[in-house]
Amino acid sequence: MSVIRHRDQSETNGYRPIIGKAAGAHATTLWDQSLPPGAATITHYHECKETHTFLSGSAEVTIHGETFLVEADSSVLIPARAIHQIRNTTPGYVRLLAFFSTNEPEVIASDMPIVS
C-alpha cells in the first residue's frame, strides 16, 4: 500500500495528479484541483466518465448546457464525452477531487457550445 500526500505532489495546470499510472493504478486516476476566485476551466470533455467531489467553496458546473450550483461536500458525475466546464463563483478558492475511470485521462478542449 502507498500513502500519497497531496501537498507533496507537483501542481500542473491547476491540478495535482495524485493517483494514476505513475502510482501503479491500472484503471483509475485521481486529481486534486483548485480554482482561484472567478476562474474557470476550459470548455472540454474526456473520453471517460469523471466524478468531481467538491471539498471547499462553490462552483457553477455546466454539463451539456445545464448549469448546477455545486457546494462543498457534494459530488457530480459527468458522463463520458460530455462537454463541461467548472466556474468558481466564490471569493475564495474552490477545491475538488476529480476521479476518472481511466489511468490516462485526456483533457480535450472543445470550442463547441455547451448544449443539451
Image (spheres, rainbow, N blue to C red):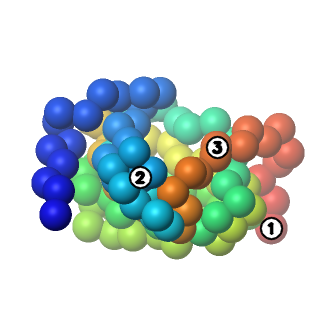
Q: At 17% across and 33% down in the image, what residue appears?
A: 8
Q: At 17% across and 36% down in the image, what residue appears?
A: 7
For the residues carrying marks 3 and 2, which lies nearer the camera in this image?
Answer: 2
- Along the line of sight, the residue nearer the viewer: 69 or 33: 33
The quadrant of the image that shows the C terminus is: bottom right
- Along the line of sight, the residue nearer the viewer: 114 or 69: 114
First of labels 3, 2 by sequence position? 2
First of labels 1, 3 by sequence position? 3
What distance separates the C-alpha of mark 1 from that of mark 3?
20 Å
What distance separates the C-alpha of mark 2 from that of mark 1?
31 Å
Residue at the extreme right of the image, as rendered:
112
Where is 76 relative to 97, above or below? below
What amino acid is found at the position of numbered circle 2 in the picture?
Gly
Place of residue 33 in the rendered image (x, y in percent of width and height, measured from the top left): 37, 42
Place of residue 24 in the rendered image (x, y in percent of width and height, measured from the top left): 36, 56
Point out which mark residue 20 bears: 2
Point out which mark residue 108 bears: none
Place of residue 55 in the rendered image (x, y in percent of width and height, measured from the top left): 25, 56
State the SS at label 2: loop
Q: At 71% across and 60% down in the image, what residue appears?
A: 47
What amino acid is found at the position of numbered circle 3 in the picture?
Val
Q: In the figure, residue 30 lies in which quadrant?
A: bottom left
Q: At 55% across and 62% down in the image, what residue appears?
A: 102
Point out which mark residue 116 bears: 1
Place of residue 63 in the rendered image (x, y in percent of width and height, measured from the top left): 66, 62
Residue 69 visible from this viewpoint? no
State the SS at label 1: loop
- Along the line of sight, the residue nearer the viewer: 22 or 37: 22
Q: Which residue is mark 3?
A: 107
State the SS at label 3: loop
Q: In the figure, residue 80 lies in which quadrant?
A: bottom right
